[in-house]
């Protein structure tokens, strides 16, 4: 009786003491619970790279403004001038009152002017000289048009000083020139350089200050009236217009590259996103032991390489899209020991299945007869698709590039650890043939004419695990190398 | 948050409600796990598995009995399954062995008595400890214990008897319990 009473009191004592006891768990416990309940968050490499590529394309498109064609001067902003001569053109009005706008029309090109411009284009292969004008009118129409008087221009410019300076027609005081080029020279609004930036972005007119800067050979320094000197020297070398005809904006280029690299791998088990301890039951069943997988597998990086070519499409001087073809060899070494062939098992339990892969192995991870170095080697072909951004692209260049590479592994020699962590078995049956790699690089380049030499570090990482989803240990190989490249512009 | 709010939120897989539930019950449940486990790491693993089961099976709670009792039951079963997965309950320790358990003073930090008692429980072999926890503290009877541990009911009884004797010896050594005078067969006086 007393024993039962005592027992009850003893149990009550134990229960009361136990219920008062508290132990506070580590933070990682909650994180692990959240991860299991709400899913394991992988680093969204694909998403980040895709966002980077898209953002770079958007920034490149928005930041590089296209050349804005200057529309004809608005009729409302300009006064009408009184014409002094009747024209004999069939298409041009013979009215004495000639609209200033029509007078400035680009239809009034002379034949000589057209020839000059064509010479520019053919000699300098310029893509940046653009004459946005109409060539519909005949030469007779052009020649027949009388040039306006200087005084008329001065009045016009003075009257429009407040609004903004308008590029006006050129003026010549040389009668002989006037005879030869009876019509005004082409409207300078339609000749512009690649580096021309409008301060006043309206399509109607330039600002006077900008006009002086951008078209020095078109202006008369002594007046506000823009003038053209036919015999004027070519624009100053520093002027943006000096670059007309010297554009090197080839849209396509071809790149050949070679990347010696070091290959290694990252191993992840299913639980925590890193290699954690694993508890296994050894043979015989009665004995249990704990194996730290990080120490059971002894692996070391090894040398690999990448060789390939790519075609680039230059959106502008700074951005290019690239795609091509490359061949990769990546490998790493595993320290193992030779042993007599023995049956082994690889448990495919990652997706809660009971599948088992039975094989034989002649290599052990623990000490055996003699040490041996196993080479896990993969031969891959890939199609890189990416973007190349060159913030600095002059004589010396600096660039950053990234790409996504669908990859096919056509020759593989992977050794995988078996379920008891004792043996290394051939895992080629479990390996994926198709995979995806992500590539990130930065480089320094040197431009010599049509060629660019470049060198820089490159990091290449495999996004999907080497083995299928059923294998519990996920392997992510990566390469770190130095990329050497030669790029040639294509016409 | 009220318990009903927490329960509703957890059924809807609301992370905030789950966190609140975890904060409220994890210290006590980890104490339960700690009494079963061999180490703190094992205890945290048990707690982690237990709460994952709680969150995934919370929709099965039928409001019969207390919510804490339901959680505790899941935690206890998780602890048992964990021990069954990695440990055996076939130790056959003689009573005299209790005298040879070295209770070193330095392994028992000077803390509150509750923790001292729990640490003493943890000194027991795993089989004894498990039966003692289930019977004396969790309130399971020997029939239920035998079903859970897949042992005979008589084994459960004998293991509990041995465990209690061993624990008494340890508690006496630690001066948490005063050993009763055997000739008078008096009830042991124990500190409260």
Image: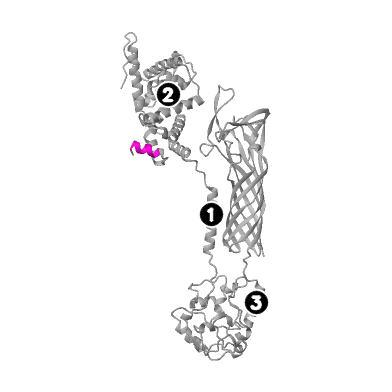
Which numbered disc, 3 or 1, marks the residue that appears first in the sequence? 1
Q: Position of residue A8 (x, y in %)?
A: 34, 17
Secondary element under disc 2, as helix, strand or loop, is helix
Q: Do marks 2 and 1 share a subunit?
A: no
* Label 2 close to label 1 by CB (< 8 Å): no
> What kind of secondary structure does the magenta stretch mostly adopt?
helix
Residue A276 visible here: yes
Relative image position of residue A73 (x, y in whole percent): 50, 79
- The way the protein has been coloured in the rendering is one colour
The answer to whether marks 3 and 2 sit on the same chain is no
Q: Residue at x 57, y 70 (%)?
A: A194
> Looking at the picture, does residue A337 appear above or below residue B188?
below
Left or right, residue A9 beside residue A353: left
Residue B185 lies within the magenta run: no
Q: Which range is magenta?
A: B2-10
Dot 2 falls on which chain? B
Residue A477's place in the image compared with A343, above or below, is: below
Q: Which mark is drawn over residue A337?
A: none
Within 10 Å of disc 3 (Cα), the crowding (few <14, some 14-19, many 20+) is few
C-alpha gap between disc 2 and disc 1: 55 Å
Could you tell me residue A187's position as x and y percent?
56, 80
Give coordinates of residue B68: x percent, y percent: 37, 30
- The answer to if B4 sits in the magenta stretch is yes
Check residue A52 in the rendering and tell me which mark sits there, or answer none: 1
Which residue reaches farthest top? B183
Q: Which residue is mark 2?
A: B122
Which residue is under mark 3?
A118
**Crowd rating for badge 2 (residues with CA inside 10 Å; few <14, some 14–19, many 20+):** many
């Amino acid at each position: 009786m007393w024993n039962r009473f005592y027992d009850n009191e003893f149990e009550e004592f134990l229960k009361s003491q136990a219920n008062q006891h508290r132990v506070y768990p580590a933070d990682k416990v909650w994180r692990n619970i959240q991860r299991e309940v709400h899913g394991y968050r992988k680093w969204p490499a694909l998403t980040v790279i895709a966002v980077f590529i898209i953002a770079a394309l958007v920034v490149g498109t928005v930041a590089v403004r296209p050349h804005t064609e200057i529309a004809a001067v608005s009729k409302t902003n300009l006064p009408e001038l009184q014409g002094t001569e009747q024209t004999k053109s069939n298409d041009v009005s013979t009215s004495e009152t000639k609209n200033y706008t029509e007078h400035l029309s680009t239809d009034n090109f002379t034949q000589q002017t057209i020839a000059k411009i064509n010479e520019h284009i053919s000699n300098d292969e310029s893509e940046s000289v653009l004459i946005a004008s109409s060539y519909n009118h005949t030469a007779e129409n052009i020649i027949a048009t009388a040039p306006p008087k200087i005084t008329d221009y001065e009045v016009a410019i003075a009257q429009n000083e407040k609004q903004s300076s308008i590029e006006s027609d050129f003026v010549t005081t040389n009668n002989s020139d006037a005879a030869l080029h009876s019509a005004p020279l082409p409207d300078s609004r339609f000749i512009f350089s690649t580096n021309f930036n409008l301060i006043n972005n309206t399509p109607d007119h330039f600002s006077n200050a900008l006009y002086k800067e951008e078209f020095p050979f078109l202006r008369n320094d002594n007046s506000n009236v823009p003038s053209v000197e036919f015999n004027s020297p070519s624009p100053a070398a520093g002027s943006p217009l000096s670059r007309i005809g010297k554009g090197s904006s080839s849209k396509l280029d071809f790149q050949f590259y070679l990347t010696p690299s070091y290959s290694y791998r990252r191993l992840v088990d299913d639980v925590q996103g890193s290699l954690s301890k694993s508890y296994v039951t050894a043979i015989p069943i009665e004995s249990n032991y704990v194996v730290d997988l990080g120490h059971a597998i002894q692996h070391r990086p090894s040398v690999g390489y990448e060789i390939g070519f790519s075609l680039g499409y230059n959106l502008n001087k700074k951005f290019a899209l690239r795609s091509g073809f490359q061949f990769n060899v990546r490998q790493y070494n595993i320290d193992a020991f030779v042993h007599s062939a023995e049956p082994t098992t690889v448990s495919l339990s990652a997706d809660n299945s009971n599948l088992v892969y039975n094989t034989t192995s002649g290599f052990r991870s623990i000490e055996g007869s003699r040490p041996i170095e196993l080479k896990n080697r993969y031969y891959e072909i890939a199609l890189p698709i990416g973007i190349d951004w060159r913030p600095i692209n002059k004589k010396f260049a600096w660039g950053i590039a990234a790409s996504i590479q669908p990859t096919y592994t056509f020759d593989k020699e992977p050794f995988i650890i078996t379920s008891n962590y004792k043996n290394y078995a051939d895992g080629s049956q479990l390996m994926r043939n198709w995979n995806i790699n992500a590539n990130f690089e930065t480089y320094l380049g040197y431009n010599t004419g049509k060629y660019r030499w470049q060198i820089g570090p490159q990091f290449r990482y495999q996004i999907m695990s080497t083995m299928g989803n059923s294998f519990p240990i996920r392997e992510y190989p990566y390469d770190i190398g130095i990329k050497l490249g030669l790029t040639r512009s294509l016409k | 948050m009220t318990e009903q709010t927490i329960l509703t939120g957890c059924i809807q897989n609301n992370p905030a409600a789950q966190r609140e539930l975890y904060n409220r019950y994890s210290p006590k449940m980890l104490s339960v796990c700690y009494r079963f486990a061999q180490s703190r790491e094992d205890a945290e693993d048990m707690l982690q598995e237990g709460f994952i089961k709680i969150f995934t099976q919370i929709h099965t709670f039928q409001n019969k009995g207390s919510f804490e009792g339901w959680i505790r039951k899941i935690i206890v079963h998780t602890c048992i399954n964990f021990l069954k997965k990695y440990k055996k309950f076939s130790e056959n320790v003689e009573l005299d062995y209790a005298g040879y358990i070295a209770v070193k003073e330095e392994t028992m930090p000077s803390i509150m008595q509750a923790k001292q008692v729990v640490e003493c429980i943890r000194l027991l072999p795993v089989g004894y400890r498990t039966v003692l926890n289930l019977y004396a503290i969790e309130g399971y009877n020997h029939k239920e214990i035998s079903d859970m541990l897949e042992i005979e009911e008589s084994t459960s009884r004998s293991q509990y008897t041995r465990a209690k004797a061993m624990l008494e010896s340890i508690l006496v050594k630690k001066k948490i319990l005063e050993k009763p005078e055997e000739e008078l067969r008096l009830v042991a006086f124990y500190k409260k």
